[in-house]
């Protein structure tokens, strides 16, 4: 017996700054077969200038950041008709085959303990999967499947029920590390994540440091993440480790100064509600290959 077609709620954000990639992304999405799609386009501070027929729109008066925009889109499709899954798709990502999304759903139905399924993201020109797109510590082999504890949040499929129970994305993060926060909350519900590298989605290999607030937000959100989700004894360990790693990685003194300003900003507060994971979750994450201090 074949499984019934899944209903997938798809959330795509736009700031009207990628007209051609956005149109290609939407064409590849609407070409998907063997799934029922409900699509919402979130204009983050703009009125979307490309809305395919049948797609809903949400217009945010100002740019509220990526996680808040994703929350607004998923909320717009919530309710009694909500899909089994929510699929978050960057507006410059392309689904290269018409069965890409159906294959991702099939993986989710095989791995029932997984709250989220992460496809392999690859640059369309080179086929290269960047290290930061492989959601595990040993990222050298991008084609090895298995359980994962974090996610590359720009392209990910999440079960609607798990997503809502976890409370969605941390909207006030604006950008960076929101996927770790959500992943840890999903794991704290007793769920897992799964990496499915056989399902490939194309995304240009851009440098996140191109964003002006990169170093500040990366540092600030590390602190917020620790304060929100870690048991108290692990917070100084986590922050000390990432300070050492960041000092070693960031070559520019100017960028490092910005990073430390972000660190101080995070230490001043603003992280939101503290809801630390249980020690049982710490143990589960550690057994899965990534203790929540690295």
Image: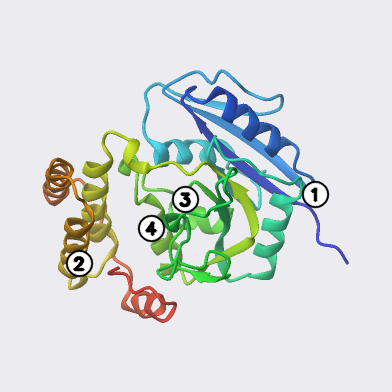
- Residue 206 pos. (x, y %): 44, 41
200 sits left or right of 205 in the view = right
Q: Position of residue 63 (x, y in %)?
A: 37, 27
Q: Circle 4 sits on which residue? A: 180
| Residue carrying label 2 | 241
Check the image and report above or below for 9 versus 287.
above
- Please state, as top left, top right, bottom left or bottom right, where the C terminus lies in the image: bottom left
Mark nearer the N terminus (4 vs 3): 3
Residue 184 image offset from top left, x and y in percent? 39, 63
Q: Sequence order check: which comes first, mark 2 or mark 3?
A: 3
Circle nearer the viewer, 2 or 4: 2
Q: Name the residue located 50 percent from the left edge and 53 percent from the top edge.
A: 164
Q: Secondary structure at mark 1?
A: loop
Q: Secondary structure at mark 4?
A: helix
Query: Label 2, label 4: how many angstroms apart (C-alpha)?
Result: 16 Å
Reading the chain from its start, which is encountered first: label 2 or label 4? 4
Decide: few, some or many residues near mark 2? Use Cα within 10 Å; few <14, some 14-19, many ≥20: few
Q: Nearer the viewer, residue 223 or 141?
A: 141
Q: Identify the residue at horizontal 78%, vertical 53% (top origin).
A: 5
Q: Is residue 272 visible?
A: no
- First in sequence: mark 4 vs mark 1: 1
Q: Marks 1/3: CA distance?
A: 24 Å
Q: Which residue is mark 1?
A: 34
Q: In x, y percent, where is residue 20?
A: 59, 25
Say what secondary structure mark 2 lies in.
Answer: helix
Disc number at residue 18?
Answer: none
């Amino acid at each position: 017996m074949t499984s019934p077609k899944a209903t997938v709620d798809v959330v795509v954000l736009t700031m009207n700054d990628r007209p051609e990639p956005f149109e290609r992304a939407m064409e590849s999405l609407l070409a998907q077969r063997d799934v029922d799609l409900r699509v919402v386009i979130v204009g983050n501070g703009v009125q979307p200038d490309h809305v395919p027929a049948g797609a809903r729109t949400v217009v945010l008066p100002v740019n509220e950041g990526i996680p808040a925009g994703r929350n607004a889109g998923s909320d717009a499709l919530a309710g009694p008709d909500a899909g089994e899954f929510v699929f978050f798709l960057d507006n410059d990502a392309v689904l290269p085959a018409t069965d890409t999304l159906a294959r991702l759903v099939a993986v989710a139905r095989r791995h029932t303990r997984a709250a989220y399924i992460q496809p392999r993201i690859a640059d369309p020109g080179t086929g290269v999967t960047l290290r930061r797109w492989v959601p595990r510590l040993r990222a050298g082999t991008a084609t090895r499947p298995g359980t994962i504890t974090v996610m590359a949040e720009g392209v990910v499929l999440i079960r609607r029920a798990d997503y809502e129970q976890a409370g969605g994305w941390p909207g006030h993060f604006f950008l960076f590390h929101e996927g770790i926060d959500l992943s840890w909350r999903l794991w704290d519900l007793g769920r897992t994540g799964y990496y499915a590298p056989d399902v490939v989605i194309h995304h240009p290999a851009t440098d996140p440091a191109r964003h002006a607030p990169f170093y500040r937000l990366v540092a600030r959100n590390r602190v917020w993440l620790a304060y929100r989700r870690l048991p108290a004894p692990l917070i100084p360990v986590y922050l000390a480790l990432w300070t050492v790693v960041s000092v070693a990685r960031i070559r520019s003194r100017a960028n490092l100064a910005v990073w430390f300003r972000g660190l101080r900003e995070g230490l001043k507060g603003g992280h939101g509600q503290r809801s630390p994971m249980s020690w049982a979750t710490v143990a589960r994450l550690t057994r899965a290959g990534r203790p929540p201090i690295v």
